[in-house]
Image (cartoon, helix red, strand yellow):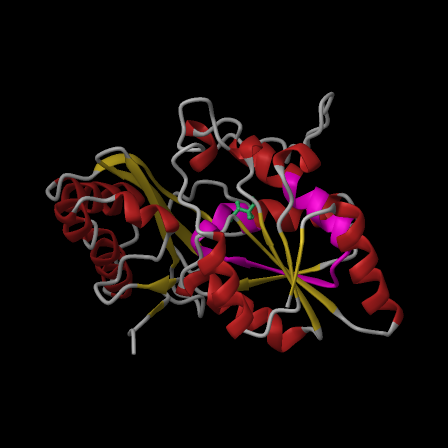
Amino acid sequence: MRLVKSIDQVRKAVRAQKEQGKKIGLVPTMGYLHEGHLSLVRLARRKCNFLVVSIFVNPAQFGPKEDLREYPRDLKRDLQLLKKEGVDLVFCPSVAAMYPGGYQTYVEVVGWNKILCGASRPVHFRGVATVVLKLFNIIEPDIAVFGRKDFQQAVIIERMVKDLDLDVKILTGRIVRERDGLAMSSRNTYLSAEQRKNAAILYQSLKWLKQAYVNGLRDPKTAESRMAAMITARDGRIDYIAFVDKNSLEPVKELRRGTLAAFAVFFGKTRLIDNTVLGSNLDIGHLFIPM
Ligand code: PAF
């Protein structure tokens, strides 16, 4: 497995593989890898024959009051994990390489970048779309894999790919959960022991919703207030709970097959997101049982 930091070098390395007819896969990450990331790496590994993983904590997707500086990093451990997964190349650029002095070009998927998570993180999706487009231009992957925990991110990237005629196929991977159902996230490490215990309510609220939907619940307002009550009883502070169409991200008046139930909740200062799609085979994610 090669570690490459320069844009020119990664371009050369990938183009050499393309010339040999290899299908290129990319899994973009911000590092501090967990089983959720590794499941995306495994999915990509099966779909390509030269696999690039990028590790870059992208400043453009953090607001001025967000956790850019504290965002956890452990490159040595990440590289060990990726080597075991049979990754071919890790691209790990510096901020100066990605955003050199004078940088002033950004990509916005207009509208969708200001709703749901975008309402409280106004620059977030602009930063994500920009860095992902840059990575696509640098690596020119045939396929790229994103996780469904960041459902809105995946939808926005799919839209950008369509709108800008990018020649890359987007695949999404299931949410991977801890034993108690909490979706895996690098940010889970910020939680105190008590917050970590309480955060399991997020999964329980999604399980409740799935069952309530099967039992006939159709009113989003009732669903929202029941879920909010469950979460706030465990000291979670709701940023938003939303019920939207999974393709258009438009709010629904009635819960139905294909409704995306998504939320962001603070435990202390840590903002966690999770979601599920009602009545579809995009299931609630699977539990990771450590060996
Ligand atoms: O999902 C993430 O880790 C990031 O938003 C991404 C896609 C790597 C862009 O920085």
Q: Is residue 92 above or below residue 284?
A: above
- Residue 198: image location, x then y, percent: 15, 49
Q: Is residue 227 above or below residue 105?
A: below
| Residue at x 26% of width, y 35% of height | 238
283 displayed left or right of 124: left
The kind of secondary structure the magenta stretch mainly shows is helix
Magenta residue span:
131-154
Locate the N terminus and report the quarter of the image it occupies: bottom right
| Residue at x 50% of width, y 44% of height | 249
246 displayed left or right of 158: left
Closest to the observer, 287 or 89: 89
- Residue 226: image location, x then y, percent: 18, 46
- Residue 225: image location, x then y, percent: 20, 41
234 displayed left or right of 46: left
Magenta-span inclusion, residue 137: yes
Closest to the observer, 67 or 284: 67
The reply to whether residue 157 is visible in this rendering is: yes
| Residue at x 41% of width, y 29% of height | 66
Closest to the observer, 232 or 253: 232
Magenta-span inclusion, residue 15: no
Quarter assignment of residue 182 = bottom left
- Residue 9: image location, x then y, percent: 78, 52
Question: Outermost residue toward the front?
Answer: 76
Q: Is residue 60 above or below residue 154?
A: above
Q: Is residue 12 above or below residue 124?
A: below
